[in-house]
Image (cartoon, rainbow, N blue to C red):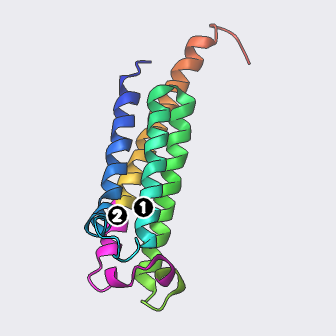
Amino acid sequence: MKRWPVYQLGMWVIAVAVVSMIPALLNVTPSAPQADSAPVSRWALALLLAGGLQIAYAVYLIQLPDWGTAWVTSIVMLAFATAYAALLGILTLAGPQSQVVQFLELGDSLPGRQASTWCLLMLVLSGSLAYFCGCISFRWRRTYWRWARPEGADY
């Protein structure tokens, strides 16, 4: 199977990772030059960590284009989509007094539904990438097994 779709998929994973880090970067950059500014929010740190992990898996996918790495990337993107779905549910059902909202310091993002809208967007993007990674992995594995197994061989 040609490797070009896997390279494209890796670039899409990097693009989604960069998009996922935009709110955190917007939160961090105004306070970066001042030494006496407020510390970075926990949600911004979590977004930067998640985006870094996504970029790491995209690099892994690009460096080793195989059906196994596409499958692993599919599982990782599905895990991110699950985390975004869980956070979306918490933000939708919980109020500002929720322990999760207070821990992540998301109280200022709740009134305008900014955090919920962002979680929904990231859920759709991560879920779509998980689906496409899985499709490419399945198609590549099926092609590999058809090529590797001789005609008439029963396994």
User: Does the segment drawn in magenta span residue 112?
Assistant: yes
Q: Which residues are magenta?
A: 102-121
Q: Position of residue 51 (x, y in %)?
A: 42, 53
| Residue sitting at the far right | 155
Q: Is residue 134 magenta?
A: no
Kindly identify which residue carries mark 2. 24
Q: Residues within 10 Å of mark 2 (few under 14, many from 20)?
A: many
Q: Is 122 left, or right, of 52 in this rendering? A: left
| Front residue of 70 and 153 | 70
| Crowd band around label 1 with a 10 angstrom C-alpha radius: few (<14), some (14–19), many (20+) | some
Which residue corresponds to the image point at 26% horizontal and 82% vertical from the top-left? 112
- Type of amino acid at the residue the image marks with label 2: Ala
Q: Residue furthest bottom?
A: 97
Q: Nearer the viewer, residue 71 or 46?
A: 46
Please state, as top left, top right, bottom left or bottom right, where the N terminus lies in the image: top left
Q: Label 2 vs label 1: CA separation?
A: 6 Å
Query: At 40% from the left edge and 81% from the top edge, which residue is drawn?
Result: 92
- Name the quadrant of the C terminus: top right
> Magenta: predominant secondary structure element?
helix
**Earlier residue among tags 2 and 1:** 2
Q: Nearer the viewer, residue 33 or 148?
A: 33
- Determine the residue positioned at 41% across, 53% down: 126
Where residue 11 appears, as percent x and y from the top left, is: 34, 36
Q: Which residue was labeled with disc 1?
A: 47
User: What type is the residue that disc 1 sits on?
Assistant: Leu
Q: Secondary structure at mark 1?
A: helix
Pointer 2 and pointer 1: residues touching (CB < 8 Å)? yes
Q: Is residue 58 above or below residue 145?
A: below
Q: Secondary structure at mark 2?
A: helix
Nearest to the observer: residue 41 or residue 69: 41
* Numbered marks: total: 2
| Residue farthest to the front, as pictured | 35
